Image (cartoon, rainbow, N blue to C red):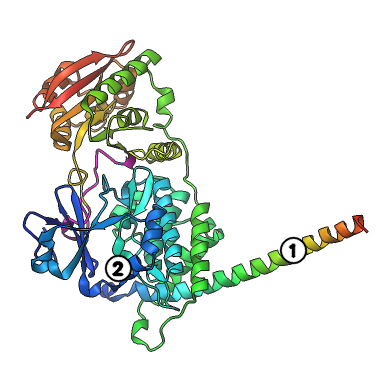
């Protein structure tokens, strides 16, 4: 029964590091673009305020 | 029987399912539960208590509370090497393969919430078995005080695979396939292997990022590295805490996105589609209310509870009520309703009477049958025995024996008998030969009278249904 010697835990640790890295990268880019758009919308609203209140 | 890890007093007995953890074990005496913790391995337990994590988890109702045991008998003999604590008793132990989709989902979210709180306090869960979660009514609670260990910076979450196998995989399968597939967990006591889950799930599950990552990619990498012996190499895998927390958030949002499949089933519509009048239902509800009020049971088991209408009536007078039904959709609906009403003394469970939960695991004694986990003071068997007798050909005396086994020696049974002429019984008979010559009220009562005294029997108005109150014979 050679399958009894297979260690599923090792592969899982490798998977965890790969998956956590990808998830972290994905969240980083998601937040980066969100901030980018958020700043843009803030900038436009700020500019709108400044235009209405010269 | 598996013997205890140490010699405990002869009038105490060990929980057969707690042998895996080398740091301690559970044992019982009467209705009290004790947990023994090895003094030489108690550093993680001490950290749990001193770090404020225990206090935080108990105050947020995430973790079961415990008291130090004051029993002087534990200070002598082999148990003197152990710290003995007495956790609050869970009224009825249930298993993940008896839970509906929503129950498994809330248990999964609780485990992740605990892991996040633990990481903030410098600890981590060393195992994330679904068996570590129990229900106090509809509220999930983590019961394993010894599952916490000190978090070492850079160390990956050792219980990650177990979490995916015990929670994510079955939830995903139930989401995409059938709602009643939590029974898969009965076959795989340590959760559904990820390669099996990955092969069972449809291709569209790849578009759910949590399932793509934590099941499909996880299974593939696991398969590729299965024969590597990383632990023996010098380089230890490193995962920063921030990445670990992001991964847990990702798991959490993935699980929140999973929903139960079909909302309604034949039985969850039954309440609306039944064939008897409002007068008959009112009378049935009134009699159950009246009888349960008189009996005041500690434990009520509602066998064939459907969506829990009558369980809720009995629960008004019972300390704890368990609703059992083979239909996972009914139980999911029942659980959802009870949770909304914040009912804490009703536990709905998926239970197939024709093929009940067996004892499984090592020596067939890790996880127990229902009768090994408790007895009922009152059993409700409402409009259910005709299914046993006709749909499964179970003889009357077998049905009576089963209830007798489940009821405590002074217990009560409220059973509804439906005559053969009733349209629901006719529906059952429509597709099979009527070989049930003894299907009548007198034969039913004669068989049950061997085990129970018939205290009262009433015919429900405008129906061919009888409600009988029976008391277990000494």
Per the image, is B356 magenta? yes
Chain identity of mark 1:
A
The secondary element bearing badge 1 is classed as: helix
Q: Which quadrant does the C terminus of chain B fall into?
A: top left
Give the percent coordinates (x, y) of residue B198. Answer: 44, 61
- Residue B227 drawn above or below residue B428: below
Circle 2 Cα neighbour tier, 10 Å, few/some/many (<14 / 14–19 / ≥20):
many
- Residue B170 drawn above or below residue A22: above
Q: In the drawing, what numbered circle is on residue B45?
A: 2
For discs 2 and 1, the disc positioned in front in the rendered view:
2
Residue A19 visible, this angle: no
Q: In the drawing, what numbered circle is on residue B116?
A: none
Q: Residue at x 42, y 65 (%)?
A: B118
Give the percent coordinates (x, y) of residue B177. Answer: 44, 49
Query: Between residues B146 and B158, which one lies in front from this camera angle?
Result: B146
Circle 1 Cα neighbour tier, 10 Å, few/some/many (<14 / 14–19 / ≥20):
few
Residue B86 sits in which quadrant?
Answer: bottom left
Give the percent coordinates (x, y) of residue B175. Answer: 47, 50
Residue projecting furthest to the bottom: B234
The secondary element bearing badge 2 is classed as: helix
Report the number of numbered marks.
2
Query: Between residues B148 and B415, which one lies in front from this camera angle?
Result: B148
Q: Residue at x 17, y 23 (%)?
A: B470
- Residue B97 drawn above or below residue B243: above
Question: What range of the chain is rendered magenta?
Answer: B346-367
Majority secondary structure of magenta residues: loop
Chain identity of mark 2:
B
Q: In the drawing, what numbered circle is on residue A37?
A: 1
Q: Residue at x 20, y 21 (%)?
A: B469
- Residue B26 drawn above or below residue B396: below
Residue projecting furthest to the top: B462
Are tags 2 and 1 found on a single chain? no
């Amino acid at each position: 029964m050679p399958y009894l010697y297979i260690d599923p835990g090792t592969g899982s640790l490798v998977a965890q590091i790969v998956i956590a890295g990808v998830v972290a990268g994905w969240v980083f880019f998601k937040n980066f673009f969100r901030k980018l758009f958020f700043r843009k919308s803030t900038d436009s609203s700020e500019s709108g305020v400044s235009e209405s209140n010269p | 029987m598996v013997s205890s890890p140490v010699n405990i007093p002869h009038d105490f007995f060990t929980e057969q399912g707690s042998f895996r953890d080398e740091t301690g074990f559970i044992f019982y005496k009467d209705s009290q539960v004790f947990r023994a913790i090895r003094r030489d391995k108690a550093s993680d337990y001490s950290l749990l208590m001193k770090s404020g994590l225990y206090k935080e988890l108990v105050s947020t109702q995430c973790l079961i509370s415990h008291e130090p045991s004051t029993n002087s008998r534990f200070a002598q003999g082999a148990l003197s090497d152990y710290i003995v604590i007495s956790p609050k008793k869970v009224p009825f132990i249930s298993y993940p393969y008896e839970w509906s989709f929503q129950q498994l989902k809330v248990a999964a979210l609780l485990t992740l919430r605990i892991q996040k709180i633990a990481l903030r306090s410098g600890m981590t869960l060393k195992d994330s078995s679904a068996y570590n979660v129990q229900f106090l009514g509809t509220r999930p609670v983590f019961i394993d005080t010894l599952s916490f260990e000190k978090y070492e910076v850079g160390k990956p979450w050792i219980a990650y695979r177990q979490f995916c196998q015990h929670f994510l995989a079955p939830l995903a399968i139930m989401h995409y396939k059938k709602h009643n597939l939590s029974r898969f967990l009965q076959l795989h006591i340590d959760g559904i292997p990820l390669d099996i889950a990955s092969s069972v799930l449809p291709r569209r599950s790849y578009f759910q990022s949590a399932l793509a990552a934590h099941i499909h990619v996880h299974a593939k990498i696991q398969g590729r590295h299965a024969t590597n012996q990383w632990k023996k190499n010098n380089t230890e895998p490193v995962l920063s805490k921030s990445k670990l927390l992001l991964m847990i958030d990702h798991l959490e949002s993935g699980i929140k996105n999973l929903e139960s499949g079909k909302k309604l089933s034949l039985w969850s519509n039954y309440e609306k589609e039944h064939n008897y009048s409002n007068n008959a239902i009112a009378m049935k509800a009134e009699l159950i209310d009246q009888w349960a009020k008189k009996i005041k049971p500690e434990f009520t088991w509602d066998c064939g509870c459907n969506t829990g209408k009558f369980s809720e009536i009995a629960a008004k007078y019972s300390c704890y009520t368990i609703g059992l039904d083979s239909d996972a959709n009914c139980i999911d609906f029942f659980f959802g309703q009870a949770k909304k009403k914040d009912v804490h003394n009703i536990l709905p469970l998926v239970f197939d009477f024709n093929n009940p939960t067996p004892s499984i695991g090592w020596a067939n004694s890790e996880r127990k049958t229902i009768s090994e986990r408790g007895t009922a003071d009152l059993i409700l068997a409402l409009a259910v025995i005709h299914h046993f007798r006709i749909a499964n050909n179970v003889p009357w005396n077998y049905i009576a024996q089963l209830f007798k086994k489940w009821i405590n020696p002074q217990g009560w049974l409220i059973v509804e008998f439906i005559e053969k002429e009733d349209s629901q019984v006719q529906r059952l008979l429509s597709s099979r030969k009527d070989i049930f010559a003894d299907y009548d009220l007198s034969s039913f009562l004669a068989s049950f009278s061997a085990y129970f005294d018939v205290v009262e029997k009433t015919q429900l108005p405008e129906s061919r249904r009888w409600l009988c109150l029976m008391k277990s014979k000494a």
